[in-house]
Image (cartoon, helix red, strand yellow):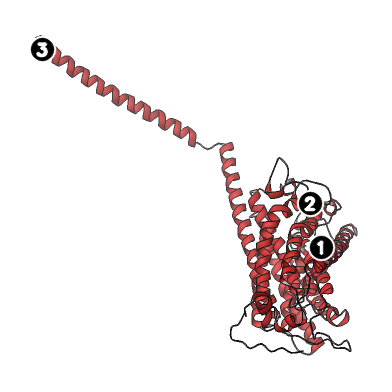
Amino acid sequence: MVRRLFILSFIAFFIFGSLSTVVRAETQAQETQSVSEKRLEPTTESHSEMLGVSKIAMDTGWTLLAAVLVMFMQAGFAMLTAGFSRSKNACNMLMKNLMDFCFGTIFYWAVGFGLMFGAGNMLFGTNGFFLKDVGDTFSSLSWSVVPLECKYFFQLVFCATAATIVAGAMAERTKFIAYIFYSIAITSVIYPIVGHWIWGGGWLAQLGMWDFAGSTVVHSTGGWLALTGAIMLGPRTGKYSPDGSSNAITGHSIPLAALGTFILWFGWFGFNPGSTMALVPEIAHIATTTNLAAAAGGISAMMTAWWMFKKPDVSMALNGVLGGLVSITASCAFVSVGSAIWIGMVGGVLIVLAVVHIDQGLHIDDPVGAIAVHGVCGSWGTLALGLFAQDKFSPGTTGDGLFFGGGWKLLGAQALGMVSVFAWCMIAGFTLFYVIKHLVGLRVTREEELRGLDIDEHGMEAYSGFSIFITE
């Protein structure tokens, strides 16, 4: 009897225990499901947070893609300048474009970015070197939500572009060691100071000057520094006859120059639309104005050259496209598509007139037309914003330009910025090249120039097996 009671008790205990375990497991599962459902239940706060994270990710992705497109423009400049130079100097031009990005990456990170965007005064930043961000160090870039490293990388590729422009005007006769010095100085100090005035909350920005993607900040800065370098160097051997007439020294490869132009045109869709640093619908308008201005510049330069020289000059048409792109860069977000065509057309005409005047009138030797493309058209693009801007394309920014009833205020601010940057570049450029000239020398010897910089500076040829003929 006792044994039977013990067995029944054991069986009852086992059944009760099993049932309680099942019940407890089900209860826990229900509680877990309830908590999980509660956690996943969308709220206004969680929805906003998710959208915010997604927007930052998309803006960062777009900005990095645009930065890579602008970086690829270094290849465009390399092809363009090499093509417009003689074959004996092709390696030298490629090396300069490569090293511009290498030196610029390091020195803009260490010094330039802080001078340009760091907190400081109206003239330059005094904080943020080596990307050290403390509090509101980079408040001038707070309008963009992308990470600081992304902002640095995007601004870096613009800085490298400004330095590369100078190499073209000083092609075929500059010492490589001199080039290294001026590349470092431009990327770490000269360009960032201009950038601070206009993009970093400096005095020109406070006075109401606008430059959306860099007609002045990037292109005029590079173009006017190129002017000082070309003047300090003097013309290439044989460029001008004793009577003052100009002799054409043609580049070795128009196909390379054309390839470089197309790469630059392609990269400009990162240059201008990417300057939003945000994936927003307005990038479509910016891309359209950019493309129309480039096409108009190419056509007007070709027609102007055809009228002046009786032939549709290829090199002028290529530079006309670039002139149109430079001209629209300041105003691409602020003008209509019709205005963009007019801005590009004027830029194309200016290219031809400026190239001829700089070469034959001023006797300044610029092998690739960098001064005309970037200095002259950059200045025109800066003024064009004051003429053609319409507030409806970017409400609350520039206001209307002179041609659309906005009066003279915006145009005056643009003109002041253009003149101020020109003056700064003249002073800084001549000082820089004077110091370099007396420190390490600026120009190669006559014999080295005649042999070509590839052999004497780099110990190699761009096209192995070619014969080099030394001519007067």
Amino acid at the residue labelled 2: Gly
- Residue 156 image position (x, y, % from top left): 68, 58
Residue placed most toward the observer, 463 or 393: 463
From the image, state whether disc 1 or disc 2 is nearer to you. Answer: 1
Please name the residue shown 66% across and 78% down the image: 454
Which residue bears the numbered disc 2?
A: 396
Which residue bears the numbered disc 1?
A: 385
Amino acid at the residue labelled 3: Arg
Badge 1 crowding class, 10 Å Cα cut-off, few under 14, some 14 to 19, many 20 or more, is many
Query: Any mark on residue 165, and which?
Result: none
Q: Is tag 1's residue or tag 3's residue first in the polypeptide sequence?
A: 3
**Splitting the image into 4 quarters, where does residue 229 fall?**
bottom right
From the image, state whether disc 2 or disc 3 is nearer to you. Answer: 3
Query: Any mark on residue 3, and which?
Result: 3
Query: Is mark 1 in CB contact (under 8 Å) with mark 2?
Result: no
**Splitting the image into 4 quarters, where does residue 84 fall?**
bottom right
Please name the residue shown 38% across and 29% down the image: 30
